[in-house]
């Protein structure tokens, strides 16, 4: 049940920022990172797969792991939570989505102008020139493909631990939060910086923050509204209320 005071805040808000994490894609069958049983980091060590050092050490292993994730995501579909946010954006202006996810499911649900803080797994870069590469020769089994222009290994266009975020995306996210009069944090453990600092920026500006998560997080005791539930359940209910105004 969504508290009436939150619905009133959402109805009155003119500039909403929705910060999403892996939890919003969990109901699409895309693994999260830190969920105890199914999270990627429960089964793999991020230091072996999601760092520049890991790629340097074994580009074929890192490339193959991202290929596995890419195929899994290609077979996934946006769920009711992604669709509810896209509906909210169609219903009215002023709803911005800032995501830590690299799965592209918000855009596939029809959301517009999604700010991708950690990149997008469907894009491939030359690891040396850092420009996008669309076609390449198939690599030998277990090897990473190489750039047709310079021969360097190709890599996914995602942020690895120890790498900085795309500046334009981070700047856009900070500006959006600074201009917000309501922020939602959906499906994130609120642990990874700098994304995790965005809700605190809003709270520091006296802007209400709502958290949608079946579990408590480090943010939970600070938020204005704590909606303990699955994104695929809470967001459609919220947008239905907002549609009936
Ligand atoms: P986590 O796996 O750390 O957290 C997922 C959160 O989603 C947890 O708090 C879960 O309780 C919650 N959750 C699970 N199912 C949910 C559901 N159906 N509805 C709502 N919430 C649900 O994932 P993130 O917080 O996104 O970094 O992780 C942040 C970053 O750490 C990722 O972007 C990635 C990772 O290392 C990079 O790729 C750079």
Image (tube, helix red, strand yellow):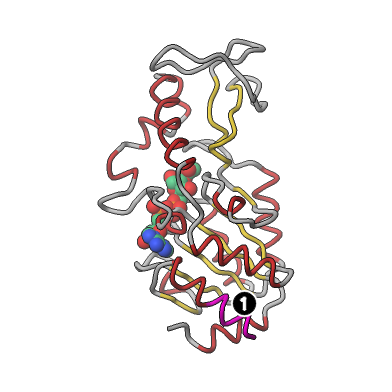
Name the spot of residue 226 as percent of width and height, x first: 44, 76
- 105 up-or-down from 152: above or below: below
Name the spot of residue 7 as percent of width and height, x first: 56, 84
Please give the name of the residue rendered at 43% of the width and 15% of the height, measured from the top-left corner. Answer: 143
Please give the name of the residue rendered at 33% of the width and 43% of the height, measured from the top-left corner. Answer: 41
- 79 up-or-down from 32: above or below: below
Name the spot of residue 227 as percent of width and height, x first: 43, 76
Please give the name of the residue rendered at 64% of the width and 57% of the height, measured from the top-left corner. Answer: 111
Q: Which residues are magenta?
A: 238-245
Quarter residue 134 falls in:
top right
From this viewpoint, is residue 36 visible? Answer: yes
In which quadrant of this rendering is ligand 1 seen? bottom left
Q: Which residue in the rendered view is the most extreme toward the left?
A: 37
Name the spot of residue 101 as percent of width and height, x first: 51, 49
- 240 up-or-down from 138: above or below: below
Q: Residues within 10 Å of mark 1 (few under 14, many from 20)?
A: few
Q: Which residue is mark 1?
A: 206
């Amino acid at each position: 049940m969504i508290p009436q005071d939150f619905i009133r805040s959402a109805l009155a808000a003119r500039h909403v920022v929705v910060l999403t994490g892996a939890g919003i894609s969990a109901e699409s069958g895309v693994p999260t990172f830190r969920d105890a049983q199914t999270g990627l980091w429960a089964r793999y060590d991020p230091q072996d797969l999601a760092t520049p050092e890991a790629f340097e050490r074994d580009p074929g292993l890192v490339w193959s792991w991202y290929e596995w994730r890419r195929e899994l995501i290609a077979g996934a579909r946006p769920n009711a939570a992604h669709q509810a946010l896209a509906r909210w954006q169609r219903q009215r202006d002023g709803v911005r989505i800032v995501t830590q996810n690299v799965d592209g499911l918000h855009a596939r649900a029809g959301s517009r102008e999604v700010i991708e803080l950690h990149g997008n797994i469907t894009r491939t870069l030359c690891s040396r020139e850092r420009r996008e590469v669309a076609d390449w020769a198939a690599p030998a089994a277990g090897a990473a493909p190489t750039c047709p222009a310079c021969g360097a290994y190709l890599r996914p266009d995602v942020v690895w631990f120890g790498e900085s975020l795309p500046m334009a995306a981070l700047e856009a996210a900070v500006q959006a939060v600074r201009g917000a009069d309501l922020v939602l944090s959906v499906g994130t453990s609120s642990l990874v910086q700098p994304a995790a600092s965005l809700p605190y920026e809003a709270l520091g500006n006296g802007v209400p923050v709502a958290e949608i998560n079946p579990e408590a997080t480090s943010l939970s005791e600070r938020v204005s509204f704590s909606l303990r539930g699955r994104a695929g359940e809470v967001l459609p209910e919220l947008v239905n209320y907002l549609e009936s105004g």
